[in-house]
Image (spheres, helix red, strand yellow):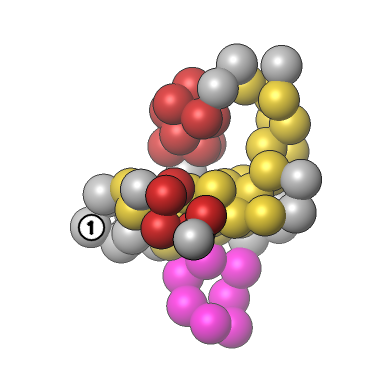
Amino acid sequence: MINYTMTEKQDLYSQRENVTFEAKNLTAAKRKASSLQAFYGTIISLEQDGYVVAVKEKNGKWIPNSFFNE
């Protein structure tokens, strides 16, 4: 199992407390983060070992993690 940290943000200045959870892989982590999303239209950031691995935009689409690994 891999540890992921989810951060939910409405804008630059408002942020919900981080949530840490375990998942088998990134796909499972994205599903879990979506289910933990408390507010509609927020941005979700997933981190693994301090590095951002995926971001869910306000429109609900995930930005591919390859964007962050350049």
Q: Position of residue 52 (x, y in %)?
A: 59, 55
Tell me if residue 54 is in the magenta stretch.
no
Instruction: Answer with left or right where residue 57 lies relative to residue 11.
Output: left
What is the three-letter code of the residue carrying label 1?
Asn
Q: Which residue is mark 1?
A: 59
Residue 55 locus on image (x, y percent): 44, 54
Q: Residues within 10 Å of mark 1 (few under 14, many from 20)?
A: few
Is 50 displayed left or right of 64 in the figure?
Answer: right
Q: Is residue 30 left or right of residue 52?
A: left
Question: How many marks do you count on the picture?
Answer: 1
Q: Residue 12 location in percent, x, y? A: 53, 82
Q: Residue at x 23, y 57 (%)?
A: 59
Front residue of this view, candidates 68 and 38: 68
Q: With respect to residue 68, does 19 lie above or below? A: above
Query: Element at badge 1?
Result: loop
> Is 10 placed above or below 46 here?
below
Name the residue located 44 percent from the left edge and 48 percent from the top edge.
65
Q: Position of residue 64 (x, y in %)?
A: 35, 48
Q: Nearer the viewer, residue 26 or 9?
A: 26
Which segment is the magenta one?
9-15
Does residue 56 show up?
Answer: no
Magenta region, main secondary structure: loop
Residue visible at 49% across and 61% down? 70
Residue sitting farthest toward the front: 70
Res 43 visible: yes
The quarter holding residue 30 reads top left
User: Which quadrant is the N terminus positioned in?
Assistant: top right
Residue at 52% in and 55% down: 69
- Is 13 one of the magenta-colored residues? yes
